[in-house]
Amino acid sequence: MVKLAQQPASPQSEYFFDMEQGTDAWFELRKGIPTSSVFSTIMASGKDGGESVGRRKLMYRLAGEILTGLPGETYKNSSMDRGSEMEADARAHYERTRLVDLQRVGFVRRKLASGRYVGCSPDGLVGDRKVLELKTMKPELLIELALKGAAGFPTEHRQQCQGALWLTERDECDLMIFYRNMPVAPCFKIERDDIFIRQIDEQVQIFDHELHRLVEKLRAMGWK
């Protein structure tokens, strides 16, 4: 049983420090709930403004986790493998170049109005008010990104970063793009955007409601 560590932020946010990401206990906490890594999928619109295919597939996967009690099988590609393999180097680079000590956290979760949870797994905590998100990128793409400066912020990560700020009750997020042995690692400072966070909150609440209506429907059909 994982012990809940002392919470450094709002009592609405529960921090699990003594947990390694990727362990059975970590998967157990994430099972059947939306997490910040899929907020962009939850908020995406499909063709003609309808539901996106990705959102529907995500709902089916989480419904399967709730019905089976088992973590779903998720797709992994080469970029995901690269991110996992370079994560320790990226974290060390951030600490060395920013002269900070990162605090590791396995999982952070927040209770929704329904009483169910939503969660995130930041790559690090910086002081009392900042979170760190790390991404890796192939050198040729990283060079292109770095040459753009602040204008190069990869907007596809906006939902995850603002979602992490919502769930951790923090004010800033550093998004660092890394590749081992590259002389640069662009880092983007993201300020908390409460208007956008309210949009995330609303869309996640809607998704959570639809997810559990689907589970109830399936159980009524005899899917116990």
Image (spheres, rainbow, N blue to C red):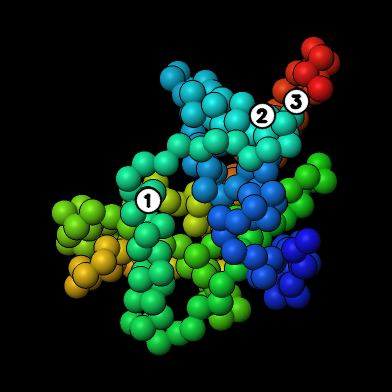
Q: Nearer the viewer, residue 124 or 39?
A: 124
Q: Name the residue under label 3.
A: 215
Q: Where, quadrant-wise, is the N terminus in this rendering? A: bottom right
Question: What amino acid type is highlighted by mark number 3?
Answer: Val
User: Which residue lies at the image location 60% right of the left edge and 31% below the top edge?
Assistant: 61
| Proximity of marks 1 and 3: CB atoms separated by less than 8 Å | no
Q: In which quarter of the image is residue 33?
A: top right
Q: In this view, does 221 lie to the left or right of 201?
A: right
Q: Can residue 11 be seen in this view?
A: yes
Q: How crowded is mark 1: few (under 14 residues within 10 Å), some or many (20 or more)?
A: few
What separation in Å lies between label 3 and label 2 (alpha carbons)? 9 Å
For disc 1, the marked residue is 81
Residue depth check, mark 3 versus mark 2: number of the one nearer the observer: 2
151 horizontally vs 38: left or right: left
| Residue for badge 2 | 64
Alpha carbon of mark 1 to alpha carbon of mark 2: how far?
24 Å
Type of the residue with mark 1: Asp
Q: Is mark 2 on a helix, strand or loop?
A: helix
Mark 2 or mark 3, which is nearer the start of the sequence? 2
Q: In which quarter of the image is residue 94?
A: bottom left
